Amino acid sequence: MIKILVIDSITSKPEYTSLNFSSKKPTREYIEHTDDVLDIIQENLNVPPETVTFTTVHVAENLSEPYTCGKTHDNLNAVLLWAYTNKGHNKFTAIYLGISIFSEEQDKINQTEILVNLLGIPIICPAENKESEIISDMTYCPSKSNGWVRYVCSIKNSWSGCVAIEGRKGSEKQRKSEYSSKLSAIYLAELVNAIYVKNQ
């Protein structure tokens, strides 16, 4: 069984599990973004549909600035801990992490890294879509250097420590400048395809 954990927001799709680890309700935009991520993953999966389940989780506490919010980071760590402690009967195959964190809080950073290593499964994160989004004086969490983590970017906007891939639709220019959230969903789907084939 393929089990994919999408840490982005909840989904409007009733066939999937939705959890909220935040005290804030997600906006319609958050929910629609998660719906889009699920659609892209499904479009690019080459495994029997009945072998795949999705669990979606909302973690953003500060809805306008989730990437630098300490409480959002706490919620992320809580989800990773939940995923680890439940792995005996609900081990996930891979994680799409749509809300990675920029942090200065070393204790929280260390906790994230410990949990990522304990989980021991691929975690795929969108990188920045443009240079102005990069926050150079704070730490990526989870770390780009962690062997379980891949930050995915476009060919046009390619950053150090990230995996640059091309989109699957549109003109060559559009494919090379696709949004990293979509590219990450494609990357995760193709990774899951490879895991499925390997396990057959």
Image (cartoon, rainbow, N blue to C red):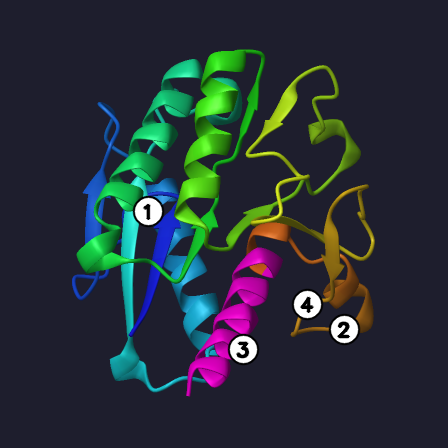
Q: Is residue 146 toward the left or the right of residue 98 in the image? A: right
Q: Of the two numbered discs 3 and 1 on the same chain, state the one appearing first in sequence.
A: 1
* Badge 2 element: loop
Q: Name the N-terminal-most of marks 4 and 3.
A: 4
Mark 3 residue crowding within 10 angstroms, few (<14) / some (14–19) / many (20+): some
Q: Is residue 27 visible?
A: no
Residue occupying the point 80% across, 43% down: 159
Q: Which residue is mark 3?
A: 194
Q: Nearer the viewer, mark 4 or mark 3?
A: 3
Distance Cα–Cα, label 3 vs label 2: 27 Å
Q: Position of residue 29 (x, y in %)?
A: 38, 42
The answer to whether mark 3 and mark 1 are in CB contact below 8 A is: no
Question: Is-magenta flag for residue 195?
Answer: yes
Q: Residue at x 43, y 81 (%)?
A: 199
* Residue denoted by label 2: 171
Residue at mark 4: 167
